[in-house]
Image: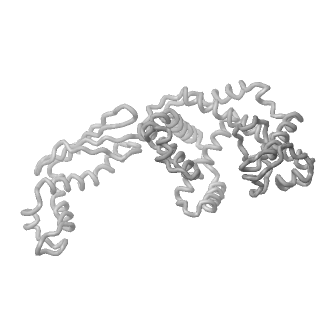
Amino acid sequence: MQIKINKLPKSEVEIEGSLEATVFEGYFNKALKKIGENIELDGFRKGKVPEKILLEKVPEIKILEEMAELALGEHYPKIIEDEKLDVISRPEISITKLARNNPLEFKIKTAIMPEIKLPDYKKISQKTISEISEKEKDITISEKEIEDTIMDIRKSRAHKVHMAESVPHEHKEGEEHDHSHEPARPADASHAGEEIPAELPEFNDEFVQQLGPFKDVTDFREKLKVNMKLEKENQLKEKTRLRIVEKIIDGAEIDLPEVLVEVELDKILYRMESDISQMGLKFEDYLKHLNKTIEDLRKEFRGDAEKKAKLALVLNKISEIEKIEPDPEQVTNEVAMILEHYKEADPERARMHAENILTNEKIFQFLETQ
């Protein structure tokens, strides 16, 4: 077999190949046999049609196409291995010459893992961390912040609300906030549809005990302060990590394959559709309301998808260079948690997800210590 590899933009390659005539002809009997196993002719049982009859009834082009499929099915993996191509998409095959007793000539286009040139990510991490201002580093919680948060909680209980709110950080009325680190509270604490007095409820032991497992006002204040501080720490960490990776991505040279962008776009739209469905709406109706098509959304989110694809490639490259791997025991525990919450999840995919999450966390920890 003669092979020529042509590099194309966006980390694609075109494989031009020619399989010599004698080798290609060797697939004739295999192709005829395979066609015979599936063909149905009057007077013959399926798979029992004599070869002579097959040659009369089956067009030669059909046999040649089957020969080409068998030949490339066998030789394509060998080409990938011999040429050391890290393929990441399905091959697009076009046959350029197809005839009996002639070489089989073809072209195969496919995407490969891109070459990535990273900037000095250690220096970037070090510089980014050193540039964090003292004001940003200050995660102390003032008495005023605690009082403001308590006031917001009291206000939220003094109006018709759909969910009891206990907010662990200072915010304005109506602003979205992350509840992942707030004091626990009973799920049935909602006052949806009830008439609630306009005056603020008194902030006392009875009030905080309704919000969750708190002994008294002092206990609530202490736990609220801890949670507010934890949230500030997490916000600072996330902001710093984002700055680091954005600067690394900006300095990286990546010929981004289209297939990876499309995968990220699919993920974004899948999550959006899931969120809309959970709200009890149909995605089609939501699109009509926006007066947009799926293609419109794909164009809108393309920039985000490119960033996500580049981020995954950059983190993967750093883990490869620094030999960063997740702890096997942590992976096992994470997989167990995923399968406990999502009973129908595929265990293998859950493991891949866990390994990815834990590896990325170790990469960020590595960058933060530079």
Can you see residue 226? no
The way the protein has been coloured in the rendering is one colour
**Closer to the camera in the image, 292 or 219:** 292
Q: Taking 97 as reference, is 304 above or below it?
A: above
Instruction: Judge by depth and name the residue closer to the eye, 266 or 91.
Output: 266
Residue 321 appears in which quarter of the rendering? top right
Please provide percent x and percent y for residue 116. 48, 33
Which residue is painted at 81% across and 45% down in the image?
158
Q: Is residue 299 toward the left or the right of residue 73 in the image?
A: right
Image location of residue 90, percent across then percent down: 36, 47
Q: Is residue 370 above or below residue 183?
A: above
Q: Check the picture and name the quadrant holding the N terminus.
A: top left
The image quarter containing residue 89 is top left
Name which residue lies at 61% across and 43% down: 360
Q: Who is closer to the viewer here, 188 or 124?
A: 188
Residue 112: x and y in percent read 40, 40
Left or right, 52 with reference to 202: left
- Quarter residue 230 falls in: top right
